[in-house]
Image: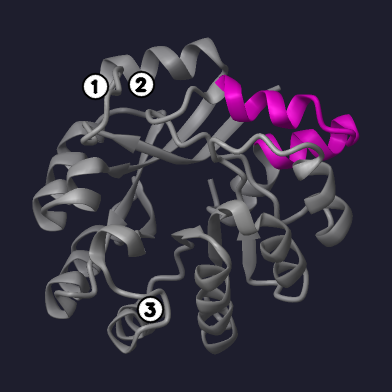
Amino acid sequence: MPVIDVHAHWGVFPFATRMASVADINGILERFDIEKCLLSSAEAIVHDFVKGNQLLAEAIAGQPRLLGYVTINPNYIEASLEELKKYLYKENFVGVKFHTEYTGVAINAPETNECFNACRRYDKPILIHCFGSQQVEQLLAVVEEFQSLNFIMGHMGGNAWKDGVEQAAEHFNLFLEPCATLADRDKIHYAIDKMGDRRVLFGSDLTLINPAFVAGMVRDANISVQQKERMFYKNAKELFKL
């Protein structure tokens, strides 16, 4: 069964991780039959988003399996808007990444909303790190305000994943992906039971987490083969127009 991984990273985080190069990542994708992998830059998330986006663009050039997210930082609104313009017209950049923890800017802050408003012209999904009840509520406010944009709740809300699922069920422009170090029982089945099988995606958090960890959660879930196929592959293919 082919796989599209919608939440992965290229580069080195300030953690004890390995397998950060393009060659390493391609080796992992081959091993797990991952057809496409959507990457954000570790450098862009943690430190310099402009430099990180540039390095990612150079790294994935000519790599058919690798696609990019352009990372924004609402502390620098004008620069973020320039980054959107620079990369989202490229064929191999398919979405936007925002990480509230590293930027220190709330998901629904005015600065963030200004960036999201600019995203309307590009029609690209926005992957947002979302962990805990407060961030789930912040994301829901954004989802309601920007109904023409598609958002992905990264980590399914983390330790607030049940809240994330229940709230997402009411918003058809909100998608979920479950990667986290929390392997809660029946997490995948619960999500699909509550909101159907069209808005749940596969994301591994590679290279921070081995794809086998999250893939095991999906394969062991009490859902049909057809639902697993939608989650592993078809939903992302349709959302990102791949």
From the viewer's perspective, tell me whether residue 237 is left or right of residue 226: left
Report, in whole angstroms, how far the alpha carbon at label 1 lies from the one at label 2. Answer: 6 Å
Up the image or down, 228 lies above or below 211; here it is below
Report the predominant secondary structure element of the magenta stretch. Answer: helix
State the residue position of label 3.
Answer: 116
From the viewer's perspective, tell me whether residue 116 is left or right of residue 185: left
State the residue position of label 2.
Answer: 25
Q: Is residue 176 visible?
A: no
Q: Which mark is on residue 21?
A: 1
Residue nearest the observer in this picture, 107 or 226? 107
Instruction: Find residue 99 and report its image quarter.
Output: bottom left
Expressed as whole percent of the image width and height from the top left, the position of residue 44 reads 20, 50
Label 2 amino acid? Ile
From the viewer's perspective, tell me whether residue 83 is left or right of residue 125: left
Up the image or down, 138 lies above or below 238; here it is below
Q: Is residue 9 magenta?
A: no
Looking at the rendered structure, the number of numbered marks drawn on it comes to 3
User: Over which residues does the magenta segment extend?
Assistant: 212-232
Up the image or down, 157 lies above or below 105; here it is above
Report, in whole angstroms, how far the alpha carbon at label 1 lies from the one at label 3. Answer: 30 Å
Expressed as whole percent of the image width and height from the top left, the position of residue 165 reads 73, 61
Look at 78% across and 36% down and name the residue there. 185
Which element type, helix, strand or loop, lies under badge 3?
helix
Q: Do callouts 1 and 2 mark residues in contact (Cβ within 8 Å)?
A: yes
Q: Do callouts 3 and 2 mark residues in contact (Cβ within 8 Å)?
A: no
Mark nearer the N terminus (3 vs 2): 2
- Quadrant showing the N terminus: top right
Q: Is residue 101 visible?
A: yes
